[in-house]
Image (cartoon, coloured by chain):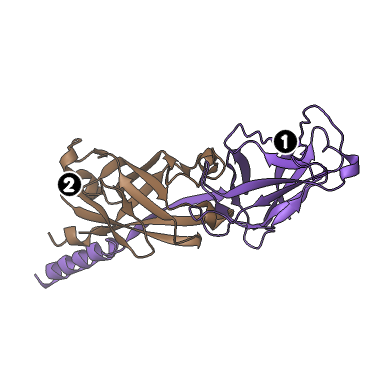
Chain colours: A brown, B purple
Amino acid sequence: MALLSKAQSMKIEISGTATFDMNSFTVTEAGNDFPSNIEIESNLMLSINSGNIWDWWGNSNRKWKIEVRREDISWNDAINLEIVRSGNGYSINNRGNTGHIYNGTNFQSVGNNSSYFFGGKGLIYYIPIQLRLSGFSIVNGANDYETNVILTIYDD
Amino acid sequence: MKIQIKYVLCLAMLVFEILPVFSQNESGSINVRFSIPEIAVMDIEPDYNNIEFSVSASADPGGEPALKQISGESVWINYSSAIRKNGNKRSINAQVTDNSLPEGISFYIEASAASPFGSRNQGVSTGKVKITQEPRPIITGIGSCFTGDGVNMGHELRYFVEITDFEKIESKTDQVFTVMYTITDN
């Protein structure tokens, strides 16, 4: 058991991209503001992996949690970025049992301070996640925005 | 017997050397990047907004002709504008197109102050402006803003005609001209 607690840290792997439909930033009728919410078209998948063979073979109950935060490059605090887990992914060492992932299924704000997103146990692959933006206003003017959403895994 | 114990200790130390240290946290990141473009859109409400004036003889002999606006419809100008930080503010210009004004008559437009419905950074009326075939600003200082869409949103437009040279007034059938509005960078 002492060896279990010395296991290598688990890893987050993210695939896919977050892209915007630029038509979302158009005004259909003169005098109007932007729509209040803009969904990001994304095919983002998050996998919980490990370089430790022990996690692959038998440590299906190793609990973890994921926290999320924003690292801004160019941002406006009036813009609210939200994240949600939109599926359960696939658990190899729990034979696809979806009961090993929990929370994160409601949109939550991503701020500059790290906050809990969701948790689970064992290795889980291809967990779909979605992003949503709100708080846009034409009053904020024409501008370029960029931020990085940082997801960090911790043993729980 | 002593030698065997040493082997066990060495093996245990080797195992703990090979296994990585616990409590490293692994992170992944998603880059989110987008641009909000410059926007400048404007329209007149309601869509069909013909303004009619009549010029008729005075009821009193020798008196000035009577000028009267026949149509009573309220006309409003709506706009949405997004400019870059420190970019030039915008104006709305008006000019007469499609035929010219009848001789001896001047035509004016006055935009009201912006209605309270819209956002901050809306434009400011330049007051009563004589409209010719050259574009003239009727609203200036438009920043990143929206007025709201429809009548009673944005600026109400009031139209005036004045007889400026009675000698040039001629009896004519209906004279039609169009006023074109343009939102432009200053």
Can you say whether B93 is above or below B123 in the image?
above
Q: Assess whether mark 2 and mark 1 are in contact (beta carbons under 8 angstroms).
A: no
Indicate the amino acid at tag 1.
Answer: Ser
x%, y% of residue A133? 42, 49
Q: Can you give x and y, in whole percent of width and height, for residue A44 in the image?
A: 39, 42
Which picture quadrant has residue A155? bottom left
Where on the picture, by quarter, is residue B161?
Answer: top right
- Is any atom of residue B64 visible in this view? yes
Quadrant of the drawing holding the C terminus of chain B: bottom right
Q: Going by the image, does B4 lie left or right of A137? A: left
Q: Is residue B50 above or below residue B110?
A: above
Name the residue at the right extreme: B167
Please name the residue shown 83% across and 44% down the image. Answer: B62
Q: Residue A140, image x and y in percent? A: 53, 57
- Judged by depth in the image, the label closer to the viewer, 1 or 2, is 1
* Disc on res. A126: none
Secondary structure, mark 1, is strand
In the shown orientation, is residue A141 left or right of residue A45? right
Quadrant of the drawing holding the N terminus of chain B = bottom left
Given residues A106 and B53, the one toward you in this image is: B53
Q: Position of residue B57 (x, y in %)?
A: 78, 37
Residue B54 or residue A146, whichever sits in front: B54
Residue positioned most to the front: B61
Label 1 Cα crowd, 10 Å radius (few <14 / some 14-19 / many 20+): some
Write down the chain letter for disc 1: B
Three-letter code, disc 2: Ser
Q: Which residue is mark 2?
A: A60
Looking at the rendered structure, the secondary structure element under dot 2 is loop
- What residue is shown at x 51% (from left), y 39% (from top)? A21
- Which mark, by number, is residue B54? 1
Structural distance between the alpha carbons of marks 1 and 2: 88 Å
